[in-house]
């Protein structure tokens, strides 16, 4: 007996073995920590070669990324230097509420406080570009786990949500890629209310702090932009209404602390939406033509083919989808190349048959998926009268230009259905293994097999996006007499000018965004003949003091006579510098 005791004493307990391997604080080895770190590492690999030149190149192109890099920089610069001008930016000189012409990315303001200048603007943007993919996969992973999926199923849900092929059509749209807060807030709200799809509402597991955190995360997501935030708000409103009906009918126990957390969270969320709406409403008052018309929405709507059309930057299917992409160009181009993934759709279809989710939940998810896909077709949906009603009656819905972006909800539901399937298969296989004598040998094989769906989804998420070197400013705009106009002035070149203006934020007449005010459209038309008497008089009337004409343009060439026209009698002077010509209007 003593010998047995001594032998057992020399065998460390399982927890002791773990302690030898897992040194350090427990949180360091917690599942959420490992999932977060893993999400970042996967994002580095899936967006490569982004991190090879993060301060000098943008993914896809340097147009819209220039706008959003400028936005992120303006957030920090305006707060630190001139808070009163927060919504009246250095660009779009002479216009009002110019920061409300597009989604503002306001929730990323803390990043804008770090660094200054155009190189910092590019680096800041690319770091966030990486993190939005990581947050999307992490958010969907923890949501699936909270709802009752196992790790391998949740891994697939995270990969489907973060690396669905349609996302590569938006490689230059940081606001559209920023979807991780949606899944994360839903996970926190479910955890805070002790809710899962497998076990329903369990009041003894409610955590008021998590519930409040979920509402705060939802409010933060809205601050990134109403394009995704507004539909998300309506989804939250639907969930809240359903929860109220459930509570009214069944009267389950509901702790006062949880009620207070929910009330506080809802107040913060609604207040955030209201405060964010104020500048946009003022902008609409200043520019009544800024509201989206049904005709405009129709030009950005895609029919059912969008859901099987891969963008060209997607490696696996993109090369074989050119014919479909060309056919959809008149329907919105990249905005309607919305393939959520063939493997994801296949797994989800099987998940409707075999799943750990109840039949009722599967039916509800299928109905929600169909509803989001239908609304996502916008004006090209069958029986689009319903979309017209949403556009007319739902507050703010008439500001949504691209219905196809609702594909994110289709993707999330596909990921959750896939997670339910994989969890069910894993549990069934594990139950059978326990009945076998060689279970210990077969268990690692099962673990590898369960990673196959994740591998397929990852393969479908491989991208071949080109990364473009960003042109340097031809001259330090802040060193010139302001306001400044850079030619050519058009929708694309103005985006680059805005990025260059992050070095000191001089006043520039150039500007480009989701909305182009009539005054800017007129300016672009009137300066095509510059320098001549009419254009010079117009620019002087607008207060412009310096015109910059780089010898190299990046979208359309400057008319050669711009550099050689005589300026005698115009009251302006021409100054030649390397790579650029300056016109001083005095």
Image (cartoon, helix red, strand yellow):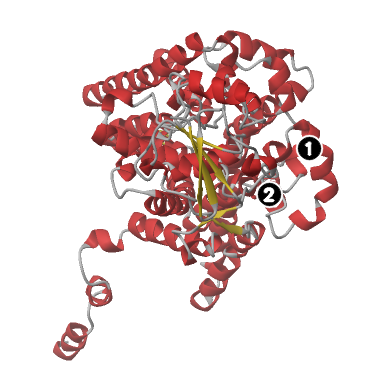
The outermost residue toward the bottom is 3
Q: Nearer the viewer, residue 328 or 172?
A: 172
- The quarter of the picture where residue 195 lies is top left
User: What is the CA distance from the residue labelled 1 to the residue labelled 2?
Assistant: 20 Å
Question: Is any atom of residue 73 visible in this view?
Answer: yes
Q: Position of residue 140 (x, y in %)?
A: 48, 46
Q: Residues within 10 Å of mark 2 (few under 14, many from 20)?
A: many
For the C terminus, the quadrant is top left
Q: Which residue is mark 1?
A: 329
Q: Is residue 561 left or right of residue 63?
A: right
Which secondary structure lies at badge 1?
Answer: helix
> For the point 59% across and 60% down, which residue is it?
454
Q: On screen, 296 above or below 63? A: above
Q: Nearer the viewer, residue 535 or 344?
A: 535
Q: Which residue is mark 2?
A: 341
> For the point 22% across and 80% down, which residue is it?
12
- The quarter of the picture where residue 6 lies is bottom left
Q: Nearer the viewer, residue 72 or 147?
A: 72
Q: Mark 1 against mark 2, which lies toward the viewer?
A: 1
For the N terminus, the quadrant is bottom left
């Amino acid at each position: 007996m003593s010998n047995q005791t001594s032998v057992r004493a020399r065998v460390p307990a399982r927890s002791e073995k773990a302690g030898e391997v897992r040194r350090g604080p427990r949180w360091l080895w917690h599942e959420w920590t490992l999932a977060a770190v893993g999400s970042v590492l996967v994002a580095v690999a899936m967006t490569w070669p982004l991190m090879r030149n993060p301060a000098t190149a943008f993914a896809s192109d340097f147009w819209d990324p220039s706008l959003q890099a400028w936005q992120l920089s303006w957030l920090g610069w305006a707060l630190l230097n001139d808070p009163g001008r927060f919504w009246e930016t250095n660009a779009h000189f002479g216009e009002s509420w110019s920061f409300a012409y597009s989604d503002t990315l306001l929730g990323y303001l803390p990043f804008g406080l770090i660094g200054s200048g155009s190189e910092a603007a590019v680096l800041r943007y690319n770091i966030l570009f990486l993190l939005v993919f990581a947050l999307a996969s992490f958010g969907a992973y923890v949501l699936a786990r909270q709802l009752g999926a196992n790790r391998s199923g949740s891994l697939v849900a995270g990969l489907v949500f973060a690396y669905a092929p349609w996302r590569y059509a938006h490689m230059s749209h940081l606001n559209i890629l920023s979807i991780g807060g949606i899944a994360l807030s839903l996970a926190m709200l479910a955890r805070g209310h002790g809710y899962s799809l497998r076990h329903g509402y369990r009041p003894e597991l409610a955590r008021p702090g998590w519930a409040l955190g979920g509402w705060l995360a939802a409010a933060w997501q809205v601050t990134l932009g109403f394009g995704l935030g507004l539909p998300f708000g309506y989804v939250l409103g639907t969930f809240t209404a359903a929860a109220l009906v459930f509570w009214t009918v069944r009267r389950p126990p509901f702790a006062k602390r949880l009620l207070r957390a929910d009330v506080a969270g809802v107040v913060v969320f609604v207040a955030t939406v209201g405060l964010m709406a104020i500048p946009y409403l003022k902008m609409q008052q200043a520019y009544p033509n800024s509201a989206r018309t049904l005709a405009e929405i129709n030009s950005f709507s895609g029919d059912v083919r969008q859901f099987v059309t891969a963008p060209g930057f997607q490696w696996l299917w993109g090369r074989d989808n050119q014919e479909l992409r060309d056919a959809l160009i008149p329907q919105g181009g990249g905005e309607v190349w919305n393939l959520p993934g063939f493997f994801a759709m296949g797994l989800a279809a099987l998940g409707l048959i075999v799943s750990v989710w109840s039949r009722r939940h599967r039916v509800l998810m299928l109905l929600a998926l169909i509803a989001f896909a239908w609304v996502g077709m916008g004006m090209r949906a069958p029986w689009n009268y319903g979309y017209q009603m949403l556009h007319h009656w739902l507050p703010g819905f008439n500001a949504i230009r691209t219905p196809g972006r609702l594909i994110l909800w289709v993707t999330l539901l596909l990921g959750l259905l896939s997670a339910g399937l994989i969890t069910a298969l894993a549990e069934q296989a594990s139950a059978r293994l326990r009945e076998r004598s060689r279970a210990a040998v077969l268990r690692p094989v099962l673990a590898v097999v369960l990673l196959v769906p994740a591998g397929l989804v990852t393969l479908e998420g491989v991208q071949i996006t080109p990364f473009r070197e960003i042109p340097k400013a031809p001259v330090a705009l802040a060193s010139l007499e302001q306001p400044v106009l850079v030619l050519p002035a058009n929708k694309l070149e103005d985006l680059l000018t805005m990025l260059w203006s992050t070095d000191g934020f001089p006043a520039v007449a150039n500007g480009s965004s989701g909305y182009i005010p009539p005054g800017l459209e007129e300016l672009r038309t009137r300066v095509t003949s510059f320098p001549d008497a009419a254009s010079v008089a117009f620019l002087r009337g607008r207060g412009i003091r310096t015109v910059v004409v780089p010898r190299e343009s990046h979208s359309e060439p400057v008319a050669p006579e711009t550099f050689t026209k005589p300026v005698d009698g115009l009251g302006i002077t021409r100054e030649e510098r390397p790579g650029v010509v300056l016109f001083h209007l005095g």
